[in-house]
Amino acid sequence: MNLNKEQKAAVAGWIQEGMNLSDVQKRIQSEFGVLLTYMDVRFLVDDLELELSDEPPAHFAKQKSSEINAKPDASAAKANPAAGTPVGADEAELVDEGPSGGSGSVTVSLDKIAVPGALVSGSVTFSDGISATWQLDQMGRLALNASQPGYKPSQQDVMQFQVELQRLVEERGGF
């Protein structure tokens, strides 16, 4: 990361104010002129040993909690075949039993042949049913392209995705 001590202190202040990773990423670019990926910002926050706020962003405050936590039903998944796993992909599922006793899962698949410019690529379906394609480049940068514009997976889903991705890559023999 190309941030000096003062810039890192500013990032720490933003996180303590309750700013989410995406907003921090945008602010780093606008105020410091440094372009970091979402994962770079996540690693920076981890390196600085900062805790993210559990409160939802202000734009979610107007939604009912039942709308935020709603899980899509199986008929919605059948109606959208594009959200499924690519044909011929290796697939694994990670299931996490949340504190409420409900079940959420993140499904990650690896493409047999990575997209051009990527070491590895594939798709992911997060616990809320939103699917995305992803790729990891030679610099270790992760790109995530969700089927829903502006989508941001939960912190728990991101952690599950990282763990499952690492497991799948190691199973395949690494890079």
Image (cartoon, rainbow, N blue to C red):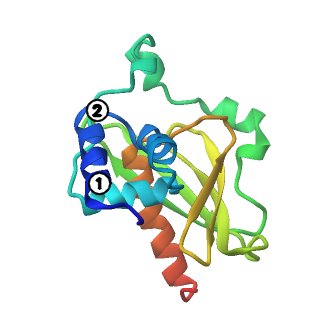
Gap in angstroms between the C-alphas marked 1 and 2 = 16 Å
Picture quadrant of residue 162: bottom left
Q: Quadrant of the N terminus?
A: bottom left
What residue would you read off at disc 1? 8
Residue 154 in the image: state x and y as whole percent: 42, 41
Task: State the SS at label 1.
Answer: helix
Q: Taking 40 as reference, is 19 left or right?
A: left
Residue 141 in the image: state x and y as whole percent: 55, 67
104 shown above or below 61:
below
101 shown above or below 47:
above
22 shown above or below 91:
above
Name the amino acid, label 2: Gly
What residue would you read off at disc 2? 18
Task: State the SS at label 2.
Answer: loop
The mark that comes first in sequence, 1 or 2, is 1
Q: Residue at x 79, y 73 (%)?
A: 116
Q: Taking 165 as reference, is 156 left or right?
A: left
Q: Taking 76 as reference, is 59 left or right?
A: left
> Which of the two marks, 1 or 2, is nearer to us in this view?
1
Residue 153 in the image: state x and y as whole percent: 49, 42
Task: Looking at the picture, tell me which residue is in the foreground, 164 or 154.
Answer: 154
Label 2 environment density (alpha carbons within 10 Å; few <14, some 14–19, many ≥20): some
Picture quadrant of residue 27: top left
Label 1 environment density (alpha carbons within 10 Å; few <14, some 14–19, many ≥20): some
